Image (spheres, grey):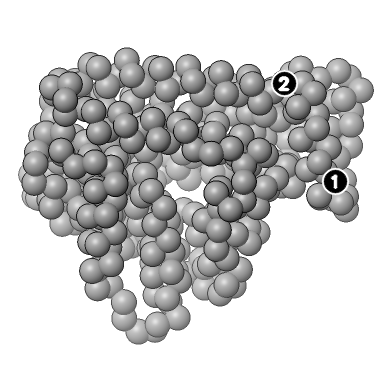
Amino acid sequence: MYSWEETRDILNEFIAGLNYEREPLNLYAPITYTLSQSGKRVRPVLAVMVYNMYNDNVQKALYPAVAMETYHNHTLVHDDVMDCADIRRGQPTVCAKWGNTKAILSGDTMLLLAYEFMSHVADDKLRAAMELLTNTAKEVCDGQQYDIEFETRQEVCEQEYIEMIRLKTSVLIAACMKLGGLLAGANESDLKNLYAYGETMGLAFQLQDDLLDVYGDTSVFGKKIGGDIRCNKKTFLLIKAMELATEEQRAQMHEWMNNPNCDTDAKVEFFTSLYNTLGVKAVCEERIAKLFAKCDEYIECVSVPAEKKVELKRFVNSLLNRSL
């Protein structure tokens, strides 16, 4: 079994060796730039590690895993355009570096490359793999639309928010885990539990992002702190604050959110102070811990020997301990 670090290195070497560039170079330079910013490669690493639980030869899993990574990065490039984001992974975003027009076109090309990479799957599993990618992509778009709509709504309930992040974030992580099992020939029960594992982990991962957006270190998190607050995104922290706040505090929150000309740094400071007063950080951390505990239940139901799951569990634990 490969460790997650070894799996990431295998993927990075594979991605570095891909030859997809052609004229015009200005279309492909942003793609190279985006895919070279590796981080932990969470999604393709999960796909390959799951495959590795069933099969020692991971080479057959690399193209489809990179397909999912390329699709994921396509969504990030377009998200940054929609969010007017300047920083991603500690570096200028594609839209900040090349402008929105090139970011949209390069993002579209990344989507096409994702399908090209997925076409390397063996014929007997190709249709299922393509359907998994397509259905996941549609759900991610659903989630993104909900996220956009929530920005202009005064109130969003917790159930609505959880469904939005399930679609926008969790289903892709779940699909990567299911893909690894599918390629390796896992049985239907295992595929179901792998998907549920990834879906639950994705929820916890997004709630962590909500926390990191407020309490993270920019040098570690790779994005400007308070971005969600500045854009009036309805995060778990904001929704819980709305629930726990007094009428006066809620009125203050709405005043900040309805003022497009406010000092955004002061806005971030206000909301951070309020979150501290209301204790929503601890509420969010408790929910994350419960979700990761649920992940353990799903992975225990996967029918491979316990020693085959050790490295995957270690990787998931490393995700839980992302620095605040």
Location of residue 2 in the rendering, given as x and y in whole percent from the top left corner: 19, 42
Identify the element where label 2 is drawn.
loop
**In the rendered structure, which amino acid carries the disc numbered 1?**
Ala
Q: Residue at x 56, y 74 (%)?
A: 98
Q: Amino acid at mark 2?
A: Gly
Q: Residue at x 25, y 17 (%)?
A: 300
- Residue 186 image point, x, y percent: 13, 30
Q: How far apart, in angstroms, are the residues tagged by discs 2 and 1? A: 20 Å
- The residue tagged with tag 1: helix, strand or loop? helix
Q: 246 or 40: nearer the eye?
A: 40
Q: Quadrant of the C terminus?
A: top right
In this view, the residue in front, 278 or 169, is 278
Residue 19 shown left or right of residue 209 in the figure:
left
Which residue is labeled 1 in the image? 266
Q: Give the image quarter of residue 35.
A: bottom left
**Is residue 222 something one can see in this rendering?**
yes
Could one spot residue 167 in this view of the protein? no
